[in-house]
Amino acid sequence: MKGFILMERIRVGIILGGLSSEKEVSLNSGRNVFDNLDRERYEPVPVFMNSDGALWIIPWQLVSQNTTADIADRLEREAGRVAYEDLGREIDFAFIALHGKYGDDGCIQGLLEMLRIPYTGSGVLASALGMDKFMQQKLLEASGIAVPRSLVVTECEWRQHPGAVRDRIAARFSLPFVTKPTREGSSVGVTIVGDPALLDDALEKALAWDTSALVEEYLDGTEFSCIILERHGVPEVLGVTEIHPQDIFYTYDDKYMPGRCRKFTPPRTIPGDAVEEIRREVVRAYRALGFRSYGRIDGFVLSDGRVLVTDPNSSSGMAPSSFFFEQAAEAGMLPSMIAGELIEGAIAIHKSKKGPL
């Protein structure tokens, strides 16, 4: 037809699976992104990272598998291995649906920078900060943003001087307090310590996942989560979700098993003035950590009214029931709309960068 220009679709590599404790969460996220990409604008290319870190381009039949192990069993027969250096021949853009180590922490971001492939989310440094709970707290605190009291216990000092570690924790925290791996997600390795006799096991549980553990004050209040979406260089709060888990804290099962947790968007019990403060503080945290494209900032409104930022994330789960899609729905955005906005926004960010993001 005269005057009609056929737009070539962008090949969007949806990177899912991975090496972390959150690889099943990643599969669910990647599957939802795959299902909701606008096929008129984008050509989805599922890229599965196996437990060895190898990349495979998989057919849509494998995307629908129940677990990453189910996919891995069929890779040799039904998928195509792609070397890192050849990934740019297969995709134009990377939608990172990886979670946890090697996905949220700057590793895959660094690889994509070297390959000159634009991607969703923050750059190398900001992604690393978004994964390291202790370092992010120090930076936020230096920016005047309220965070929980905490200290770090390295595996080395715990093995060599356990008595001194116990004394240091007892001097700083009253019961209960929280122990967690310094660099993990989805509440993996988290313990609420309400009895001193449980401390050793709690630290061992955390150190099973990392070389250091974070000990943190227990927060009495209401948990919240906010998605930040960057539009034309300006971070905007997509929504505020109030969280009421079944357990004493927001566990892995609460996050991912249906019916385990109640979430309210907009909040039901958090006062309006606190909601406005949340909106201000999460944007400040986003900027302080150098996040780009989008992020998820979690925190607490304490019983005394204070707002604390507890867990800034440079990415977010992308499952249908995730905070991202729940808040997008409240804002009147369909899943295909939010996925498209993430891609187009990230492409614009990468076009304007000078060196790595």
Image (tube, grey):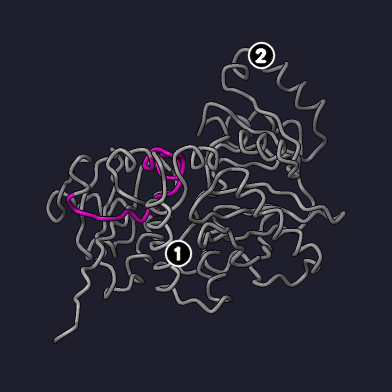
In the rendered structure, the answer to whether residue 270 lies left or right of residue 1 reads right
Q: Magenta segment: does it hold 21?
A: no
Residue at the far top: name it: 160
Q: Is residue 72 above or below residue 245?
A: above
Check disc 2 and report the residue beneath it: 161
Image spot of residue 57 (x, y percent): 20, 53
The segment highlighted magenta reads 89-109
The amino acid beneath tag 1 is: Ala
Q: CA distance from mark 1 to mark 2?
A: 43 Å
Determine the residue positioned at 53% across, 26% down: 211
Provide the secondary structure element on which disc 1 rests: loop
Give the class, few, some or many, for how many residues have Cα within 10 Å of label 1's Cα (few <14, many ≥20). many
**For residue 223, what is the image quadrant?**
bottom right
Left/right placement of residue 238 relative to residue 8 reads: right
Name the element at disc 2.
loop
In front of the other: 334 or 10: 10
Rendered residue at 45%/64% (across/down): 319
Which amino acid, mark 2?
A: His
Q: Which residue is mark 1?
A: 319
Front residue of 263 and 44: 44
Q: Residue at x 73, y 23 (%)?
A: 166
- For the N terminus, the quadrant is bottom left
| Percent coordinates x, y for residue 152 in the rendering | 65, 28
Coordinates of residue 87 in the picture (x, y in percent): 21, 47
Q: Is residue 237 shown left or right of residue 33? A: right
**Which residue is nearer to you in this view: 204 or 149?**
149
Number of the front mark, 1 or 2: 1
The image quadrant of residue 197 is: top right
Q: Residue at x 30, y 38 (%)?
A: 114
Q: Position of residue 42 (x, y in %)?
A: 28, 68
Q: Is residue 334 visible?
A: yes
